[in-house]
């Protein structure tokens, strides 16, 4: 990704050097507690075509290695095994495969729930009204987890 994209997106782009490029990676996590299987984000939509490399673009997603659901299956998990999904934010590279998990509770901010176009009844809106948690301005806690915003 270009330096302006990495450090500001479209805001303040003029303060950065577009010729400087950074490598990055898309991270999604599986948390297996033994009692439940929790995903943190679900990656890019499988139907998204592979982007050709363009050194002038602000970001290039790289070569597709594997789609999310087959990779999850290869790791030993079926769609039905997933009990909860924690969405860090609404971008497609984090929510692209939510539609594949109709039985999982999907936790996301109320604001982002209103913006994600997902016709399902398994979204659990989170208000983040439990105050600060370390260096996070807003949090939502229960006895088993803490979501930070």
Image (cartoon, rainbow, N blue to C red):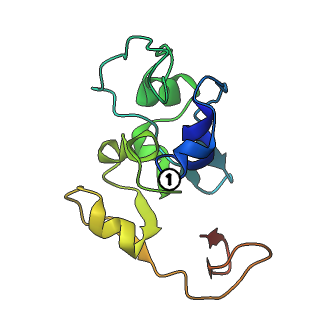
Image height of 58 relative to 97, above or below: above
Residue 33 appears in the rendering:
yes
Disc 1: which residue: 11
> Hey, which residue is sitting farthest front in the picture?
14
Q: Which residue is painted at 61% across and 43% down in the image?
A: 30
Image height of 108 relative to 138, above or below: above
Image height of 145 relative to 106, above or below: below
> Hey, which residue is sitting farthest bottom in the picture?
130
User: How far from the left and from the top, in percent, is residue 14?
Assistant: 55, 43
Q: Which residue is painted at 37% across and 66% down in the image?
A: 112
User: How far from the left and from the top, in percent, is residue 39?
Assistant: 54, 49
> Which quadrant does the C terminus fall into?
bottom right
Q: How many marks?
A: 1
Q: Is residue 115 left or right of residue 25?
A: left
User: How far from the left and from the top, in percent, is residue 146?
Assistant: 66, 72
User: How far from the left and from the top, in percent, is residue 19?
Assistant: 61, 22
Q: Which residue is painted at 37% across and 17% down in the image?
A: 51
Location of residue 47 by image quarter: top left
């Amino acid at each position: 990704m270009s330096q302006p994209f990495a450090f500001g997106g479209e805001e303040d782009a003029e303060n950065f050097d577009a010729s400087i490029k950074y490598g990055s990676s898309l991270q999604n996590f599986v948390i297996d507690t033994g009692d439940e299987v929790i995903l943190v984000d679900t990656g890019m939509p499988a139907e998204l075509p592979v982007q050709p490399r363009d050194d002038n673009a602000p970001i290039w997603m790289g070569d597709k290695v594997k789609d999310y659901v087959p990779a999850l299956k290869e790791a030993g998990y079926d769609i039905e095994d997933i009990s909860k999904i924690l969405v860090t934010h609404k971008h497609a590279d984090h929510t692209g495969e939510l539609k594949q998990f109709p039985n999982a509770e999907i936790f996301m901010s109320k604001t982002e729930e209103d913006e994600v176009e997902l016709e399902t009844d398994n979204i659990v809106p989170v208000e983040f009204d439990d105050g600060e948690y370390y260096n996070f301005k807003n949090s939502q806690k229960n006895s088993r987890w803490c979501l930070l915003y």
